[in-house]
Image (tube, rainbow, N blue to C red):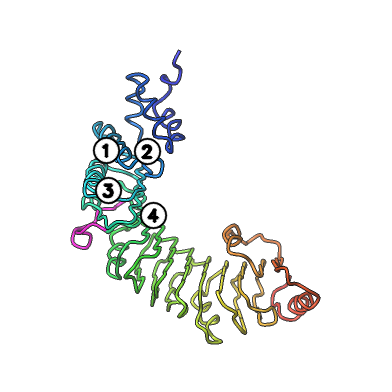
Amino acid sequence: MDRISHLLESIVHHILSFLKNTPAELVRMSVLSKSWFNLTASFPNLHFILSNFRHRKSFFKYVEYTTSRFCDQNLIANRLFLVATVREHAESDIVDRCLEKVLKNGVRELVIYITNSKYRLPNILLSVSVLKTLVICGCELPSSWMLDAVRFKSLIKLSLVSVPIDDEVIKHLTISFPLLQEFEIDSCSGLKRVCVYGHQNLQSVYIQCNAAVERIDIEAPNLYSLRIINEDRTGAPRMNLASCKKLTTVSYFGYLLPDSNGFTNFVSNFPFVENLYLAINYKCKNLKLSSHSLRTFMLHSMCDLEEIELNTPNLALFGYPCNYGSFWPMVRRSTHLKACMQCYPDDCIDALWFKKLRLFWTRKMGSKF
């Protein structure tokens, strides 16, 4: 007896979700019976990765076949995940047709990675009112992006990776998405300024820049997390985040200004910070930090202990020097942390290093460890 066919459709769809990386299995299951054909055809998570196929032709054929079966039922997709390269005009046409069919019916989460090509997303994307998550990598934004009224009334997360944009696009995006909570910009060419004004729901911002971003201005009363990866050697961008009174977690990877006040000036941008995570790509001198709000300070730097001076009476956790991978597990609420210092020395430690550590502990710590 086929007991699975008698399960609720939502339960069957959950089972099928574990086969998202094996499209051949989904096809085999769809031919078992008419009921299984209908169940696989109504599967709301459309997952297409070119690398899972041996041949490009079979991949694009599968994409077109699967989206047509699903959209013929006038269903709203929970998720459309597409990772591919587009080499020919015929392949681009297939992607256009499939996107337009899915977007016309509606999709709640769209993740699209089209690399090694200049593929432009269709204008119909601008009218998907039920979209909650939008991740775009390698594509160009729709041609009428700045002209038409964008109707993303439900969008909560927006991530742009390797997308050509400019300062005006950022302003237009944030104004058009009133419910946006998470905003990510990663290696987007043409961007010089990140300006977000008066956004009431924005909570988390992530910026990774390969070229110089000159300024970051954010006015968002509910912003609590800012993460910046800066590969530009000229130093950190100028910042204005004084109005973000809930900004308590800041992570910065990259370069600060080379002068002696570079670190002090950088930290002054975040008067309410409680959790600070820094990875500085050079040996800084006279690293002085004064903060009454700071609870967690994780540092990755070639700075010697005798060059560090902390005036942080409420600091509960100090990590030095932390590797990059240890930063993110430490991002947490530090209210109930037991006061401690964590050191991650390399293989060159000796008696002199421990002497410096003792002097640092007894003389330069402004907090009670």
Q: CA distance from mark 4 to mark 2?
A: 18 Å
Please tell me in which quadrant of the rendered image residue 314 appears.
bottom right
Q: Earlier in the sequence, mark 3 or mark 1?
A: 1
The reply to whether dot 3 and dot 2 touch (C-beta < 8 Å) is no
- Residue sitting farthest toward the right: 351
Marks 1, 2: nearer the viewer:
1
Please tell me in which quadrant of the rendered image residue 178 appears.
bottom left
Q: Identify the main secondary structure in magenta.
A: loop
Q: In which quadrant of the rendered image does the N terminus lie?
A: top left
Marks 4, 1: nearer the viewer:
1
Which residue position is annotated with label 3? Answer: 129
- Residue occupying the point 36% across, 42% down: 48
Q: Earlier in the sequence, mark 3 or mark 2?
A: 2
Q: Nearer the viewer, residue 152 or 29?
A: 29
SS at mark 1 in the image: helix
Q: Position of residue 242 (x, y in %)?
A: 45, 75
- Residue occupying the point 55% across, 74% down: 281
Q: CA distance from mark 4 to mark 3?
A: 14 Å
Which residue position is annotated with label 1? Answer: 64
Q: Which label is found at residue 45?
A: 2
In the displayed structure, 144 sits above or below 303; it is above
User: Does residue 3 belong to the magenta stretch?
Assistant: no
What segment carries the magenta color? Answer: 141-154
Q: Position of residue 194 (x, y in %)?
A: 36, 70
